[in-house]
Image (cartoon, rainbow, N blue to C red):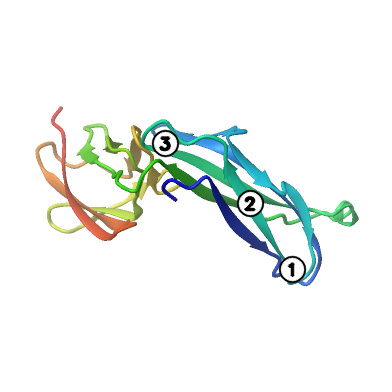
């Protein structure tokens, strides 16, 4: 939340057996196709580990040690279910991991400023020149005649400030000079954008 130094998240055990949980905070950065997580002490979590009874809940407090230096700073909170030693002899074990985005802002006035283009090699390129992340859930691309163009999406639908992200097109790239139509869902609702295909 803008200007806040603390926040909370509640973890609930919906299972019929007790479980152990670990919570860790990471700096979150991106390159063209991947997310990078780096352990950080700038976002503290308490408690970092705990046990949950069946149906039990635990409030985890997050404390930001210093406000971001302009714009928005992104973190990821990893919530891991820790298998019990009693499960060690089992051949197959299932452990749950949740990866939650956490954003620290200096104010609520920041916004994303996206530039869209299609490279001749077949990448849909989205550059965020703004000071706030952009969420592009369910992103799809259509040719001028309306035919859908399959996309290989990155790990998640966010484009962080100052980052250029690439979505790989599957199949033959469109002709240079044409204009495609990108649609999807953002934090403000549905969007539709014209995307030019760059020349060779």
**Disc 2, SS:** strand
The circle on residue 33 is 3
Q: Residues within 10 Å of mark 2 (few under 14, many from 20)?
A: some
The quadrant where residue 59 appears: bottom right
Residue that appears at 29% across and 46% down: 109
- Height in image: 166 above or below 51? above
Residue 185 picture location, percent across and down: 31, 58
On screen, residue 139 versus residue 44, left or right, reads left
Q: Quadrant of residue 26?
A: top right
Q: Earlier in the sequence, mark 1 or mark 3?
A: 3
Counting residues from the N terminus, which is met first, the one under dot 1 or under dot 2?
1
Residue 159 drawn at (x, y percent): 36, 42
Q: Which mark is residue 56?
A: 1
Q: Name the side, left or right, on which 69 lies relative to 141.
A: right
Residue 3: image quadrant is: top left
Instruction: Estimate the x, y position of residue 168 in percent, counting from the top left.
Output: 34, 40
Q: Quadrant of the C terminus?
A: top left
Residue that badge 2 annotates = 61
Q: Is residue 185 above or below residue 199?
A: below
């Amino acid at each position: 939340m803008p200007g806040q130094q603390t926040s909370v998240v509640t973890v609930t055990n919906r299972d019929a057996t007790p479980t152990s949980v670990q919570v860790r905070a990471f700096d979150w950065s991106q390159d063209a196709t991947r997310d990078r997580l780096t352990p950080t002490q700038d976002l503290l979590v308490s408690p970092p580990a705990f046990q949950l009874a069946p149906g039990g809940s635990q409030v985890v407090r997050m404390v930001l040690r210093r406000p971001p230096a302009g714009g928005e700073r992104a973190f990821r909170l990893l919530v891991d279910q820790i298998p019990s030693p009693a499960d060690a002899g089992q051949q197959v074990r299932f452990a749950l991991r949740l990866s939650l985005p956490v954003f620290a802002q200096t104010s609520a006035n920041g916004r994303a400023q996206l530039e869209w283009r299609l490279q001749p090699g077949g990448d849909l390129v989205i550059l965020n020149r703004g000071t706030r992340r952009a969420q592009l859930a369910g992103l799809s691309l259509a040719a001028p005649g309306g035919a859908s163009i399959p996309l290989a999406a990155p790990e998640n639908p966010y484009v962080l400030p100052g980052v250029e992200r690439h979505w790989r097109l599957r199949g033959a790239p469109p002709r240079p000079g044409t204009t495609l139509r990108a649609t999807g869902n953002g934090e403000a609702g549905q969007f539709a954008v014209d995307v030019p295909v760059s020349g060779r």
